[in-house]
Image: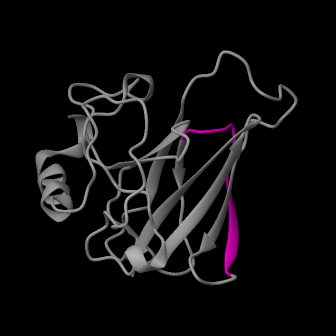
């Protein structure tokens, strides 16, 4: 379980028990979008269109390299299933008063060939706050990997993700 610790996992499971959508263990594909949010206590809900559920099952084989023991922890799949955001801080928060960070490990599915070998490896995240024109861009140098991703407001953020000629989308909820 590594640095996740049982208390974090237990708290995550308790918060998400009625909301997280599960697929069969180790599934490589994202679940179908649902009309409910998986982020208990967040400001977003089904009415806001936030449809990427947080899951706490095992990561698929292609995304669990570097994890020891059980590779369970909060994570969100991209809509195409080409990338997963492993949430080391869950729930994500607009303001983190405890000194922790909104750490996200981005893991992309390995591709045999890049759709565009001249495309930059940097992961470019264009995030739009649901129901508004508020848009921000975040970058993860070197492509998918560890990052601290903060947003200027709480709510459901629709993310357009681009890296190495690949694209995917997902929603992440930031609590106040």
Magenta stretch: includes residue 61: no
Left or right, residue 150 beside residue 47: right
Residue at 21% in and 60% down: 16
- Give percent across and percent down for residue 61: 38, 22
Horizontal arrangement in the rendering, residue 25 relative to residue 84 (left or right): left
- Quadrant of the frame with the N terminus: top left
- Relative vertical location of residue 105 with respect to residue 1 in this rendering, above or below: below
Looking at the image, residue 108 sits to the left or right of residue 14; the answer is right
The residue positioned 16% from the left and 62% from the top of the image is 18
Residue 171 in sight in this render: yes
Image vertical order of residue 8 relative to residue 29, above or below? below
Q: Is residue 135 magenta?
A: yes
Quadrant containing the C terminus is bottom left
The residue positioned 51% from the left and 38% from the top of the image is 81
The magenta span reads: 134-145
Q: Is residue 106 above or below residue 17?
A: above
Task: Return the x and y of residue 174 as percentages of the image width and height.
Answer: 43, 72
Would residue 140 be visible to someone looking at this image? no
* Picture layout, residue 41 above or below residue 168: below
Coordinates of residue 130 in the picture (x, y in percent): 56, 77
Q: Quadrant of residue 30?
A: top left
Residue 159 quadrant: bottom right
- Out of 52 and 99, give the one closest to the viewer: 52
């Amino acid at each position: 379980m590594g640095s996740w610790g049982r208390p974090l996992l237990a708290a995550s499971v308790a918060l998400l028990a009625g909301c997280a959508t599960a697929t069969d263990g180790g599934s490589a594909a994202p679940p179908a979008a649902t009309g409910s949010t998986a982020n208990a206590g967040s400001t977003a809900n089904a009415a806001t269109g936030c449809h990427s559920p947080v899951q706490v099952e095992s990561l698929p084989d292609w995304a669990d390299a570097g994890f020891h023991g059980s590779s369970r922890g909060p994570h969100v799949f991209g809509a195409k299933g080409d990338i997963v955001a492993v949430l080391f801080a869950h729930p994500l928060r607009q303001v983190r008063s405890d000194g922790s960070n909104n750490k996200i490990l981005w893991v992309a599915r390995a591709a045999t060939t890049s759709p565009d070998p001249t495309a930059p490896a940097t992961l470019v995240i264009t995030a739009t706050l649901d129901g508004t024109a508020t848009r921000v861009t975040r970058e993860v140098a070197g492509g998918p990997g560890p990052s601290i991703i903060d947003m200027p407001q709480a709510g459901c953020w629709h993310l357009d993700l681009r890296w190495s000629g690949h694209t995917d989308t997902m929603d992440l909820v930031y609590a106040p």
